[in-house]
Amino acid sequence: QVQLVESGGGLVQSGGSLTLSCAASGGIFSAYAMAWYRQAPGKQRELVASITAGGSTNYADSMKGRFTISRDNAKNTVFLQMNSLKPEDTGVYYCNAAQRVGAVRADYWGQGTQVTVSS
């Protein structure tokens, strides 16, 4: 069982920056693919960025060039550096850990951290 705890959210002005952190415990962190999702009010949860166990990254189109996902396996932590923030980036940001064993995929979620971007 993996436990995930996000931190780093808050209120920031448009154009500002924030760095989110997600600390993992209870599993072999380096074996998990990690991702950040967000859910805006009234909208479905959407993928923001992901990073594989091997370090390959993927971003949603609207985040490319503004957001950077990284991981520190020694600290069991994944980060999301967010620059040039826009009001539409407002939402609850969730950390996700995923591992596939054969045909079975296990997903774990943090409790979320609120990001609010003011115009």
Image (spheres, rainbow, N blue to C red):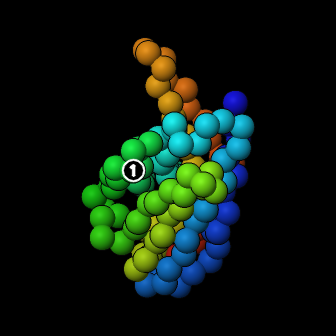
Would residue 114 be seen by someone viewing this image from the given angle? no
> Left or right of 8: which side holds 60?
left
Quarter occupied by the N terminus: top right
What is the tally of numbered marks visible in this picture?
1
Image coordinates of residue 51 in percent, x first then y, are 41, 49
Using the image, determine if residue 49 lies above or below residue 1: below
Outermost residue to the front? 74
Q: In terms of depth relative to the viewer, which is nearer, 17 or 43?
A: 17
Task: Give the crowd class for mark 1: few <14, some 14-19, many >=20 residues within 10 Å.
Answer: some
Q: In the picture shown, does residue 18 fall above or below 1? A: below
Say whether residue 55 is visible. yes
The foreground one among 27 and 50 is 27
Does 20 sit above or below residue 36? below
At numbered mark 1, what does the secondary structure look like: helix, strand or loop? Answer: loop
The disc labelled 1 sits on which kind of residue? Gly
- Tell whether 34 sits left or right of 10: left
The residue at the point 53 percent across, 62 percent down is 79
Q: Which residue is mark 1?
A: 55
Q: Position of residue 53 (x, y in %)?
A: 44, 42
User: Which percent across, then down, holds residue 45?
Assistant: 49, 46
